[in-house]
Image (cartoon, grey):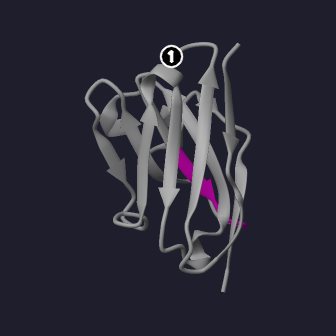
């Protein structure tokens, strides 16, 4: 049984930092990523990493502020979030799959999801 367990969410002031963690169990994946969903909005892509190549990709909205990294051996992915803005407030979801790299921006490309962790950025 595959499980993705996230941690690290919480309340942070604007301009601050937070690091999210996600560990997958049950099988290994070639690609892991993070999505987020703000109230009343659709779930959107934030970042992804492919273990085999070390490639990373980011949404324009987080590029330069967020960094995705991880430990392939531990099947764990991190999302370091710096210079947080109030508009970063959302539930952050970890995702894992073997999807083609050019499809990672779509929620439909991912089969496995964590339960989500709330990040609230206060002004």
Q: Is residue 115 visible?
A: yes
Where is the C terminus found, in terms of image quarters? bottom right
Residue 98, percent from left and from top: 43, 23
* Residue 27 placement, left or right of 52: right
Compared to residue 27, the image places residue 115 above or below, namely below
* Residue 90 placement, left or right of 76: right
Compared to residue 80, the image places residue 6 above or below, namely above
Estimate how packed mark 1 is, as few (under 14), some (14 to 19) or many (20 or more) residues with alpha carbons within 10 Å.
Answer: some
Q: Is residue 43 visible?
A: no
**In percent of the image, x 43 and y 47: which residue is there?**
68
* Residue 40 placement, left or right of 48: right
Compared to residue 98, the image places residue 41 above or below, namely below
Where is the N terminus found, in terms of image quarters? top right
> Is residue 58 inside the magenta stretch?
no
* Residue 107 placement, left or right of 92: left
**In percent of the image, x 55 and y 67: which residue is there?**
17
What residue span does the magenta drawing correspond to? 34-40
Residue 52, percent from left and from top: 30, 24
Residue 60, percent from left and from top: 36, 64
Q: Secondary structure at mark 1?
A: loop
Residue carrying label 1: 28
> Is residue 36 inside the magenta stretch?
yes
């Amino acid at each position: 049984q595959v499980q993705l367990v996230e941690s690290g969410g919480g309340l942070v002031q604007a301009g601050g930092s937070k690091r999210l963690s996600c560990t997958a169990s049950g099988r290994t994946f070639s690609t892991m990523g993070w999505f987020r969903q703000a109230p009343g909005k659709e779930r959107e892509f934030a970042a992804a990493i492919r273990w085999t190549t070390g490639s990373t990709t980011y949404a324009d909205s987080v590029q330069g502020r967020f960094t995705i990294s991880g430990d392939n051996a531990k099947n764990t992915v991190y999302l370091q979030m710096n210079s947080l803005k109030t508009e970063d407030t959302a539930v952050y979801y970890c995702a894992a799959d073997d999807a083609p790299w050019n499809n990672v921006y779509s929620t439909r490309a991912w089969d496995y999801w964590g339960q989500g962790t709330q990040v609230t950025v206060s002004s």
